[in-house]
Amino acid sequence: MTTPVIANIIEAEQGTSLWQDAWLRLSRNRLALFGLAVLVLFILIATLTPWIAPYSYTQHNLDLGATPPSAAHWLGTDIFGRDMLTQIMYGGRISLAVGFIATAVALLIGITWGAIAGYAGGRVDAVMMRMVDIIYALPFMIFIVLLMVVFGRNMLLLFLAIGAVEWLTMARIMRSQVQSLRQQEFVEAAISLGLSPATIVRRHLIPNALGPIIVYTTLTIPSVMLLEAFLSFLGLGVQPPQTSWGLLISFGAESMEEYPWLLLYPGIAMTLTLFSLNFLGDGLRDALDVRGAKD
Amino acid sequence: MWRFVGYRLLQAIPVLLVVITVTFFLVRAAPGGPFSSEKAVIPEVKAALEAQYGLNLTLFQQYTSYLSDLTKGDLGPSFKYPGRSVNELIAAGFPVTAELGFYALLVALSIGGVAGIIASLRPNTAQDYIPMSAAMIGICMPSFLLGPILILVFGIYLEWLPVSGWGDIPGDKILPAVTLGSTYAAYVARLSRAGMLEVMSQDYIRTARAKGLPEWQVVTRHALRGGLIPVVAFLGPAFAGLLSGSFVVETIFQIPGLGRFYVQAAFNRDYTMILGATVFLATLIVVFNLLSDILAAWMNPRLRAQFAEQ
């Protein structure tokens, strides 16, 4: 039997959880919210593209050629008479997919590596982190170009190669998180309860290190997307008949003098996405109060 | 301090060895030999060619002979341009790329540094938001998009600047340098702002103010040295980025530099050229990382003290 006053006190005592608190702070950051909204919209469009695209992906019309934006083709058509909006929607699917999948690869390797090094400590930690130091110093951009040349332009390889570059910082962040967490009482309690190291890492350490992981993930996706676009621009990434924003920008740059809209619209789509991800990442960093994630 | 230099030097050696080894075996593992494209080569000719380039040896023998050539500074012959060595191609292309990179770095440091310092002096005002928003645009606008847009605006619509070439027409170096430097200007602006903000709240800055120094002297004589350490530490990674960025910028502006050679070699599958250029670029990047780390350590009294104690 609690009186309303006591109920109020209990409610106040419970306060807000870390996540509620973070969401509150994030929702006050207009730029971050804008980024989140744009991102959700783009992901929705990319998912639904096959059903909502105004034209079919392969439909072309050589007689029509490149036309500026009109009522029939909102963003104009390219030199083959293909609808630019449709091209950008399908290109966005690939660009976003590369961004998310390659980041997922990086997360998986980085979290596992960092968690093991941080949890094991001692010599294992020293060896594992020295390896990260050495790989860190390798000129990766050049290696990826080399890899794409040597083994052909294969999407799966692209995911793996980009993911293999981006996991290093994740491993460092995860290691320092695990190192500080494993000194705490709840981890000691878990150890004395006889839980296996794998369970402790999965159930106790990773959930508690989630803040930095989320922030860093949000900031990794744009750099991965840039890398894909960079390779596609050089002709070493996504290959026709598939397309991506990087490839569309590359084609647009070739004929920008006569048909500037072919460069402009894919460029806007790409820049807007990168903007949104960066704003959201910065906002999340402030909201979750993560330091040194990436700056 | 010397301990630190020695430690970082020792660290650079395994890195270089890994680079050379990985690149060598990666290129050798590539499907299709360098001469497989030529139609119906007589077996004797093929054998002679392979003997000339040492391809008849075992992989390990090729590797050790490549390493021993490397210690003499010889990067081997080019597969695609008979009679020319990789060294000659690098000697022709690298000075151009180095000059482009130098101008781009100037753009990055001057524009980025000034913007970051100005922003840090009045945080959370318009003086902070305007340059930092511009920096965000710089980070989100990749060079392969910025380059064509600059060409379109300044080269084609306004006709102020030439759109391609290198050193042929006065002013043709401006657009490539700005294109390559802009992303790094944005990063430098963010780093110098963050570094300056941290330094400006330190006690020794309060001391400097308390003894009556004018604000500009507080900044130039006391704050800059500490505040710019993150920027100096960023120079190494920035240098690596500038080199790979030159692949795109040299392609866009048709500049005959190493970056463009590299991309062409990649398309021609000129394996020795790729191998040689990768080893060359990687070595440069490792050396620059080393230099920028040492410079940053030298500027940071805390780190110096830490190594002096040991």
Image (cartoon, rainbow, N blue to C red):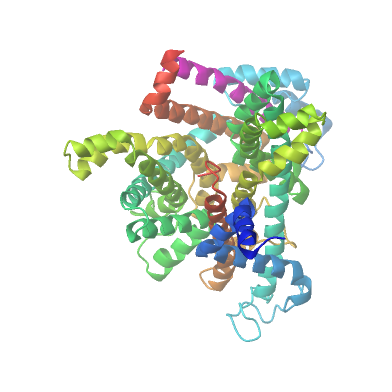
Q: Where is residue B169 in the image (x, y as percent from the top left)?
A: 36, 54
Left or right of A274 on screen, residue B190: left
Compared with B257, A51 (above or below) is below
Instruction: Say whether residue A92 is visible.
Output: yes
Pinpoint residue A203: horizontal percent, then vertical percent. 77, 40
Is residue B93 at all visible to an observer of this figure? Answer: no
Task: Please tell me which residue is depicted at 39% across the width and 35% down the height of the picture.
Answer: B229
Viewer-closest of A215 and A79? A215
Q: Which residue is drawn at 53% across and 73% down?
A: A258
B242 relative to B125, above or below:
above
Identity of the residue drawn at 66% across and 39% down: A167
Predominant SS along the magenta part: helix
Is B5 contained in the magenta span? yes
Say above or below: B246 vs B67.
below
Extent of the magenta region: B1-30
Relative image position of residue A188 (x, y in whole percent): 72, 29
Identified at 38% across, 28% down, the residue is: B300
